[in-house]
Image: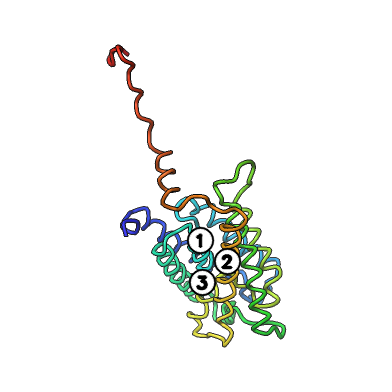
Amino acid sequence: MREILTLAFARAVSVEFIGTLIFVFIGLGSALKWPSALPSILQISLAFGLAIGTMVQAFGHISGAHINPAVSIAFFVGNQISFLRTLFYVVAQLVGAIAGAGILYGVTPANTRGNLAINALNNNTTPGQALVVEILLTFQLAICIFASTDNRRSGGVGSPALSIGLSVALGHLVGIYFTGCSMNPARSFGPAVVMRRFSPAHWVFWVGPILGACLAALLYFYVLVPYCMSIARIANVERAETLPEPPARPKRGENPSSS
């Protein structure tokens, strides 16, 4: 409870809302069917990837820039964040997605809105097939997030924002053909709420990403690179590392004020 009563926590929740709003606005906006030029798969993939990469670069140091309920839940499963932080993040992300989709709906001409790029099963894909696709695509995204932001790694890790952005773009290059590519329940939920259109297979865009991200967390944090300390102990160690060193005690016989 002490965690959620801090200004830092309020900032973190706020940027999860803002980041998801911008991500959904840009991502869905890239998929609108303008009469002058229909969007390409590459355009949509790059827009989603660049949007998430930009949000990670901008807000990663404040909240971790999850921008995705599946990622927040996976971090909780991996024992990296608390239950209350997970809950507040997920709510902020869902509300941000609705706000982003609502703003896009309001500024887009009626003849271009279409279905606001709602996720749906495409090309005769069955719900079972779509579920497997969403699990795999979100799994690779979550593994990339965990590995690229792991502060235990040494050496040249590269840019986490770029890595995560490319992972999102990669998922869209494949997933758009199957489901429109969700990998993010908030991205699917926002436009569905604004358009008041929930397909019978909407559950796929929740179960698939959450299951894929949680499987990645179990594999990464408990098998591949397990933590040897509890979260509380890690927090204490990090706090001790940031505290200033105490002044050296004078040796016996020295005058403390002589220096």
Q: Mark 3 points at which residue?
A: 186
Amino acid marked by disc 1: Phe
**Relative side of 28 to 103, left or right:** right
Asked which quadrant contains residue 126, the reply is: bottom right
Q: Which of 113 and 190 is in front in this view?
A: 190
Q: Name the residue under label 1.
A: 75
Amino acid marked by disc 2: Ala
Assess whether mark 1 and mark 3 are in contact (beta carbons under 8 angstroms).
no
Q: Name the residue under label 2.
A: 213
Mark 1 or 2, nearer chain start: 1
Amino acid marked by disc 3: Ala
Tell me which residue sits at (50%, 58%) in the image. 65
Mark 3 against mark 2, which lies toward the viewer?
Answer: 2
* x, y percent for residue 141: 62, 62
What whole-number distance in Å separates the C-alpha atoms at marks 3 and 1?
16 Å
Q: In which quarter of the image is the C terminus?
A: top left
Tell me which residue sits at (62%, 55%) in the image. 224
Assess whether mark 2 and mark 3 are in contact (beta carbons under 8 angstroms).
no
**Relative side of 115 to 174, left or right:** left
Can you say whether 3 is above or below 95 in the image?
above
* x, y percent for residue 222: 57, 58
Q: Mark 1 falls on what kind of element?
A: helix
